[in-house]
Amino acid sequence: MNKKFNKLYNILCVIFALIFIAAMIITVSALPNIGDATNPTNNEVSEKYLTDSSWETGSLNAVSGMILDYRAFDTLGESHVLFVATVAVFILLRRDEDSRKDLPTRCLNQSYEQAYDPILAKSLEFLIPAIFVFGIYVIANGHLSPGGGFSGGAIIGAAFILYLNAYGLESIERFCNSRTYLICSCCALLFYGLAKSYVFYVGANHLHSIIPVLADGSILASGLILPLNIAVGVVVSNTVYALYIMFRRGGFSR
Amino acid sequence: MQILMASLLILLVILAVTIAVTKRLLPAVIIFMSYSVINSIIWMLLQSPDLAITEAAVGAGISTVLFIVAFKRMGLFEKAIDEESAKGTEKEASSKSGKEAENE
């Protein structure tokens, strides 16, 4: 009976998958062509963004002008999603002092996770500064070139993970432990939320910061977009690193 | 350009099916990473470099690392290695299990 049911189940699975694939392909083939001038997406909204975003927001990159100025609350929500995800992982995986006692030492010993690898450590001496500088470049030039807080933050988080794997938990916890994680993330989210709330409170008139809105291709010429990019980058890099270290054996030691 | 795009898309479908079919976990994760890399090339061809950078950093880098760490923590790689060694010659397997029994 069970075997028969399994066979039927497999056949039904394949049939359902084929029907689903056919429906998807029919839907996709009904979509308009990419880059066609008569597409419904070519309306006044994208036209407004493309023509006005450079002088209104000071961002030469229309995408970051859109996500950090016109739709800044959207990005705020995304940053909070990341933060909530890490907090959920913290709740599920973090071990406090009491439960640490009951576990076998194998589960907590961080040095069990990796052996010191001289090739990795030596090559990362050259690679890690380069990755950090590239990540900072991507964040700081978010309003001039492709990139921004999300991608630059992910690059810096990857650099943190490499550092942790090459030199061990003790050397990275000198400057990056759970306390600094919480302080940095909360400050970045608070700054973002307050700055954008103020802007929307005064009717989306731009917050008059020290940084001018020029859009002339220099880094300090985009109003609030650069600080907001930095805040998003801090949140993303912290999230990436915290998720990695919580999934690792042992987690944060402090 | 058309041929490049078409071949990339076909490769994407092949990789997606391969991920679902692959039994061993580490190769599946690595194929998933190559899927993300090809996806980011496609974003680049569609003239959205922002998405391409994010896809390369998050899809190919971070999610692969997180998958590997999570599987390692669950002990799935160790189990796979055990199964592989068990598939070796019967003599080896029997002697190994005998040793294990002695250790226990």
Image (cartoon, coloured by chain):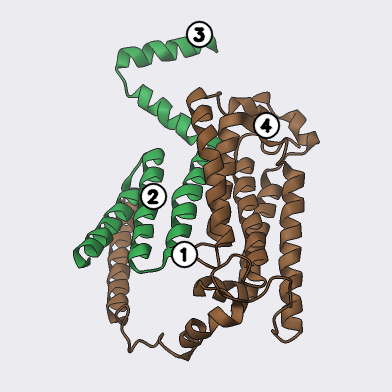
Chain colours: A brown, B green
Q: Residue at x 75, y 58 (%)?
A: A186
From mark 4 to mark 1, how far is it between C-alphas?
33 Å
Classify mark 4: helix, strand or loop: helix
In the rendered image, which quarter is residue B51 located in? bottom left
Chain letter of disc 1 in the image: B
Q: Is residue A193 above or below residue B100?
A: below
**Quick one: SS at disc 1?**
helix
Residue with the mark numbered 3: B102
Circles 1, 2 touching at the beta carbon (< 8 Å): no
Nearest to viewer (mark 1 / mark 3): 1
> Label 1 belongs to which residue?
B50
Cα–Cα span, label 2 and label 4 = 32 Å
Amino acid residing under circle 3: Glu
Label 1 or label 2, whichever comes before in sequence order: 2
B90 in relation to B31, above or below: above
Which residue is under mark 4? A171
Which residue is nearer to you in this view: A63 or A249?
A: A63
Give, as a three-letter code, the residue at label 2: Phe
Amino acid type of disc 1? Answer: Asp
Q: Helix, strand, or loop for circle 2?
A: helix
Q: Residue furthest right?
A: A98
Residue B1 location (% of width, % of height): 22, 65
Q: Position of residue A93 (x, y in %)?
A: 67, 44
Badge 3: chain ID = B
Residue sitting farthest toward the left: B3
Q: Are marks 4 and 3 on the same chain?
A: no
